[in-house]
Amino acid sequence: MTKGGVIASRRRGNLTTPCVERGLVGIIEKVRLFVAFVTIVALMAVAFMPLDMALGQGGNATRVLPDTVQRAETFDVTVTFIAPADNFNSIGLTDNAPDGWEVTVDKTWCTPNAQFVKATGNKAEFLWYGPYAKDADFSVIYKVTVPDYACAGNHTFDGFLGYYLGSEEKPLENITGDSEVGVPVYDKPLICCNPKSFSFSATQGGSNPADQILEISNSGIDTIDWSLSDDAAWLSEDSTSGSSTGADDTTLVTASVDIAGMSAGDYSTDITITAEGAINSPWTVPVSLHISPPPEISFRPESLTFSVVEGGSASADKTLEIWNSGGGTLNWALSDDAAWLSENPTGGSSTSEHDTVAVLVDIAGMSAGNYSATLTITATGASNSPRTVSVSLHIGGAGPPPTAPQISFKPGSLSFTVVEGGSTPADKTLEIWNSGIDTLHWTLSDDAAWLSEGSTSGSSTGEHDTVAVSVDTAGMSVGDYSASITITADEASNSPRTVPVSLHISEAASQISFSPESLTFTAGEGGSASADETLEIWNSGVDRLDWSLSDDAAWLSENPTTGSSTSEHDTVAVSLDITGMSAGDYSANITITAPGASNSPRTVSVSLHIGGAGPPPQPWLSRYWWVVVVGVAAVVLLAYFLRRRRAAF
């Protein structure tokens, strides 16, 4: 009994202890599972939040719009953003309402109040100077009025935020949040056209501007039967009638311009669309055409003369200036008909600025005598191409070795160009040396009050003396001036020698400069547009340049489209919208105009390549790779704890 009782007691004790242990283990495992679950949820929440939020960076500007608006309604647009760091300054916000919609702005509608606000058509602009501290809240409200006959459907807003942190300029950030508002179908037939206007530009005698597309549909009820016409011989459309049952039933009309036989100037007309029963019939689409004059070749001097001694060194280089005295851009090229003649460079471009060409001769192996050649300047599209420059070369007999000092100098001539009232042109350098024996004691003089030399005397036994030649155009009028610098040396065998000097003073004006000269976009069919490109515009002349931009393609847009510069560089964001466009190559032009500018207008060529759609994109492989990593880690963690739990029991 005792033995059995002891055994039974021990068994009961052995059974009780494991149960208690298993209960404690169960509680601990439940706690562990709960912690694992919370950790997994937290990791997945971080994984799927926006990347900039996950990294703790400031959020982008966010726009709030109503879902639907009515025609002729005025509604509020709200944009908010937060200062991402201290010393947040020079903050510029630009937001664009749909084309043809009107915006209204006020400094007091901003928190904090903006220092500068501007409304231009559908564009609202705001500026704060700052600096502001990190996490400062900004709120912007502006008002938008919907046109009486706005098209039905969704209408897009787009804009960007730019700012500095300290002295560092940050990249432009697109405004996020709401980007579209809807306009309902009208309760009567309504003509809808996009775009609202056309602008074409071309050069006289050049190719026709690219065609543009007009979209026509019915934004109301029932069916409209429309027809269109224009009152200009230079404008045509590939379709002049059609019908539409609604906003999704759109006809694409190609508008073309033919400038054959037209003179330089500005032209305008309207495309008129009529549809019986439509509430807004007739509807007009303004069309403008700017034809700039053709380029024109100008150059100086009209002839070049070289004189050398047989067996001696080549004569000093001569300078030829080439520039465009017409419109557009002169793309010139040089050629000659003599083996002993060469030019550097042999090509260039000019809107009005003077390009300088060094003309050289090489007399190696040539005998004494007189030679002649011709330089030919050609430029495609120029009204006076080609132009010729006569060149003469005299090679004298070698003669006996020099028995006296001899004056030598380079360059053979000097040329200055300046804008009336502008800054003084940079000095030119004249080199003088003795190409004979003994010592050359030289002196300089000139015959023009506007001309001066930094040194008027010197001596040389063979070394080159350098003289700075300056001009002072104060009080001088627009025109061409000439003078001579005379080099004399009593003991020289060839004294005196003369250096021709020319001065061109052009009329004071602003001048359009821009960079780059062309823009290239690449996108995939059905995909998103490529990133915006940046165009810089500035005034390289005098006074103030008030510039404006236009383009000839519905898929192209610029922001801003106007500005002014005294010399500072203005930045323009150039964007494209490839919605509905097929794979292929497209081209367009951005035209920069500025009243009073000496070289207005200027054009920027734009090319767009849309590739085939290809396989569907896999954004998670690139943009969300880290989501996959976190998810896998969470699954592994959960599997580990489940395994531990099973092992415990």
Image (spheres, grey):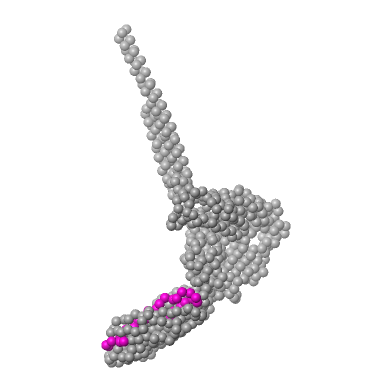
Residue 439 included in the magenta stretch of the image: yes
Q: State which quarter of the image contains the C terminus.
A: top left
Front in this rendered view, residue 353 or 217: 353
* Residue ID at (47%, 83%): 481
Front in this rendered view, residue 127 or 302: 127
Which span of residues is magenta-colored?
415-441
Residue 250: quadrant of the picture: bottom right
Residue 15: quadrant of the picture: top left
* Residue ID at (48%, 74%): 422
Front in this rendered view, residue 306 or 116: 116
Front in this rendered view, residue 52 or 648: 52
Residue 630 included in the magenta stretch of the image: no
Q: Position of residue 199 (x, y in %)?
A: 59, 66
Q: Residue furthest top?
A: 1
Would residue 605 be visible to someone looking at this image? Answer: no
* Residue ID at (53%, 59%): 576
Residue 633 lies, with reference to residue 352, above or below; the image says above
Q: Residue furthest right?
A: 277
- Left or right: where 261 falls relative to 132: right
Q: State which quarter of the image contains the N terminus.
A: top left
Q: Position of residue 580 (x, y in %)?
A: 56, 56
* Residue ID at (65%, 66%): 270
